[in-house]
Amino acid sequence: MKKLLIIYPHWPPSNLAGIHRPRLISNFIGEFGWHTTVLTVNPEFYEEKPDQDILKTVSPAVQVRYVNAFKALKRFRFFGDIGLRSFFQLYKGARKLITSDRPDFVWIPIPSFYTAVIGRLLNSRTGIPYGIDYIDPWVNGFTNLEKKFSRAWLSNAVARILEPFAVKNASLISGVSVLYFQPVLDRNFKNKKIEHLGMPYGFDPNDHLIRLTNIKLPWDPVRDIKPLAYAGAFLPKSHLFIELLFKGIAELKRSESWDKRVQLFFIGTGIYPGKTIGEYARENGIEEIVHEKPDRLPFLEVLHLLSESAGVMIIGSTEKHYTASKVFQSLLSKKPVFAVLHSESSAVQILRDANAADYLCTYTEGISPDDLQANLIRTFQSLVMEKSKWAPQLDELDRYSARQSARLLAEKLDLICSTK
């Protein structure tokens, strides 16, 4: 069996979204001839609150090795990134593992972006092939870049220097969508062929079989209400959708066409630039309908919340490359899904393949705000009024599962290693 070394500074019990990429690949790639060792940072150096329950989602076959990190500097947040704080420790730990375990390949999901540089350094010193996996874009993957000398502007300036160095000797560029890393290929591999692979986050159906007890819902289950739930970060390019949706709901409310039982719950939205969801609700006079709880919830609690809701909301992005990995957990909740996404988002095809596009509203560049709002409200009201019989074909999701993503990655790694 070949050996894969995954370097990623966060790992369960971290509850950050990024851990699911290495976790899901690790859970399944062993079925395709690759034994996984994950090199990560000791949880005592994480800044987020640990989630012990998420450890239940990790396959016991995955080996995990830990290194320490420098403590975060509270006053200098540029150095709070765990990829920086653990850079030398991860590099040193990887060198030791390469000597002792002799892995065949190093795979580094990003962000944290700085760990991508470790792959190039390891390759230079040991010759081991490596790949970089784009969970998010690196260069130009930041918001508010127009503000010169802002933190985001500086991060992007650093990215333009580090990314070409990091990817130069890579044997594989992968990502949750080809659109995420196509600019990387265009910038750095115009005259050089490199293996690349787009594969979705996917899902592990076993996650949805884990049952937690004593979970407090954000709504009163005794009240006669229809809770619609959105779980996850509120994206910078989602503001337009929320603004138009809330304006439309306000109009329905004024015309007494709104079902008073319907309540909207936005959970784990985090800290984000611009107006908050709560502010949009207050501006439109629907604050008694909309409830925002920005604190991140543990992963398994989110799955429980979605399964107890009357419907699930996916508020996507105006960017076509947004993959909406949450579409899988939304569909597996077995509750009707209202989604607004760019028409070219890969999530649109996933919903259609699963016969789950009854309540899908798509966005295209050039559509007028009035037309978009009309489509949003028409689609949203269809969900509220249950105009369609919700009957998704979940078996059709198998092609998008984490198992299939792991199979694709294993095949690509087999090809690369056979030529080395």
Image: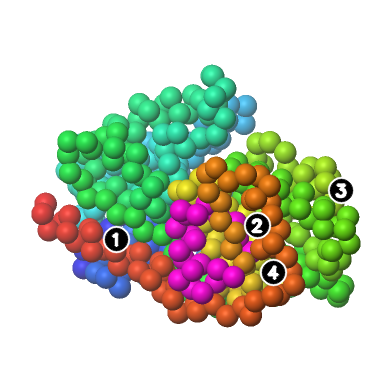
Q: Is residue 412 left or right of residue 355?
A: left
Distance from Cα at disc 4 to Cα at disc 3 = 22 Å
Residue 383, label in figure? 4
Residue bearing the label numbered 3: 285
> Upstream in the sequence, badge 2 or badge 4?
2
Give the residues in magenta. Answer: 338-358
State the residue in front, 372 or 311.
Answer: 372
Name the image quarter holding residue 301. Answer: bottom right
Q: Specify the color scheme.
A: rainbow
Distance from Cα at disc 4 to Cα at disc 1 = 37 Å
Q: Are marks 2 and 3 in contact (CB under 8 Å)?
A: no
Determine whether the residue tagged by mark 1 lies in a helix, strand or loop. Answer: helix
Q: Are marks 3 and 1 in contact (CB under 8 Å)?
A: no
Residue 161, label in figure? none
Q: Is residue 100 magenta?
A: no
Crowd tier of the residue under label 1, counting other residues whose Cα lies within 10 Å: few below 14, some 14–19, many 20 or above: many
- Asked whether residue 294 appears in the rendered view, the answer is no
| Residue drawn at x 54%, y 77% as measured from the top left | 392
- Which numbered disc, 2 or 4, marks the residue closer to the eye? 2
| Residue drawn at x 30%, y 54% as measured from the top left | 197
